[in-house]
Amino acid sequence: MKSMSIKVSAFATVSNVGPGFDIMGFAVDVEAEEMIVNLKEKPGIKILKSLGNKNQYPLNLEKNTAAVAVKKMLSFLGLNIGVEVRIKKKIVPGSGLGSSAASAVAAPFALNELLGRPFTKKDLLLFALEGEAAASGSFHADNVAPCLFGGFVLIREYNPPDLINLPVPKNLYCTIIHPQFSIKTSEARKILRKEYSLKDVTVQSGNSSALIAGIMKRDFELVKRSMNDLISEPARSKLIPGFYEIKEAALNAGAYGCTISGSGPAIFALSDSERNARIIGHAMKKVSDAYKRKNIVYVSKINLSGPVVKG
Ligand code: HSE
């Protein structure tokens, strides 16, 4: 076999989306990483060190989400070949923007392309989910599914996965502020309350259902009323200095909801135009800067492509 190579790109994702803990996520046009995958004759998976930035991802095959996903895929195919992976992270892991999920998606996507597409995207989800579980310690698809399929994805059920790709308003914009420190998803899951009252369950289901209705009806006021979360935000906001002030600044600047992206520390806000999204980003940054932590602001529409092959 000749050595074959491909370069792909995977995008960042906002997961949970307020009341949709573990069941909702969307992709944004912010590149999370670039990945080069090489096929080799000599069997074995190798995660190569990143050129430039160091220590951005584990080289250990059990812990690296790309390696775990590739291993599952090769064993499913009964293929004994060599696969080398090199990752150039554009967003650091522990961001709340699906960095580890991007690797878990990019690797099987790239390998599938190199092998002549033996799998559909739906099949690839199972490998990506295994990969993501290696980083987060749990099986959740709210980053990997939107990263793989693009768009706004609702996960009705995990076993087997039943996903619904929602039609999104064309003018739905997302502003993200990413304070430059890391939160490990596995740790951020441990601090969540394990039990909820019947009233909490009712309120959370009301909000998550209404959020979906708001997105589908393009009713931004309904989206705003529904962006309330009783699971992630109350516990994880404590990990993000200035969270409630940043949220207030976003809402005062006109956001249709603002909360933590995934397990944080990234915070996202929704709006209905690029101009408003930039104004909201400016307001969030002003407050966040006062906390003297470096931060990066992104403004994006919903990404609809999923991962792409780079020329
Ligand atoms: N739904 C996940 C969580 C997303 O909030 O823990 C983080 O990967």
Image: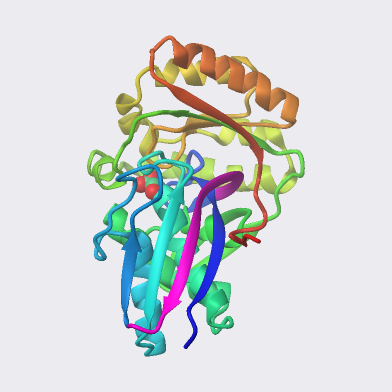
User: In this rendering, would 170 be left or right of 60?
Assistant: right
Where does the image place residue 234, in percent across and percent down from the top left?
Answer: 35, 30
Residue 111 appears in the figure: yes
Measured along the vertical axis of the image, is residue 115 above or below residue 221?
Answer: below
Q: In which quadrant of the rendered image does the C terminus lie?
A: bottom right
Residue 154 appears in the figure: no
Question: Would residue 6 be counted in the magenta stretch?
Answer: no
Q: What colouring method underlies this structural image?
A: rainbow
Measured along the vertical axis of the image, is residue 16 above or below residue 179?
Answer: below
Measured along the vertical axis of the image, is residue 3 above or below residue 128?
Answer: below
Q: Please give the name of the residue rendered at 52% of the width and 40% of the height, measured from the top-left corner.
A: 207
43 or 259: nearer the viewer: 43
Where does the image place residue 76, in percent across and percent down from the top left?
Answer: 38, 85
Q: Main secondary structure of the magenta part?
A: strand
Measured along the vertical axis of the image, is residue 200 above or below residue 258?
Answer: below
Q: Quadrant of residue 277?
A: top right
Q: Please give the name of the residue rendered at 52% of the width and 71% of the height, measured from the top-left corner.
A: 5
102 or 275: nearer the viewer: 102
Where does the image place residue 135, in percent across and percent down from the top left?
Answer: 30, 55
In this view, the residue farthest toward the front is: 2
Part of the protein shown in magenta: 26-42
Q: Please give the name of the residue rendered at 33% of the width and 35% of the height, measured from the top-left corner.
A: 182
User: In this rendering, would 37 be left or right of 310?
Assistant: left
Q: How many marks?
A: 0
In this view, the residue farthest toward the top is: 290
Where does the image place residue 231, in percent across and percent down from the top left?
Answer: 36, 39
Question: Would residue 37 be counted in the magenta stretch?
Answer: yes
Q: Please give the name of the residue rendered at 47% of the width and 53% of the height, measured from the top-left corner.
A: 143
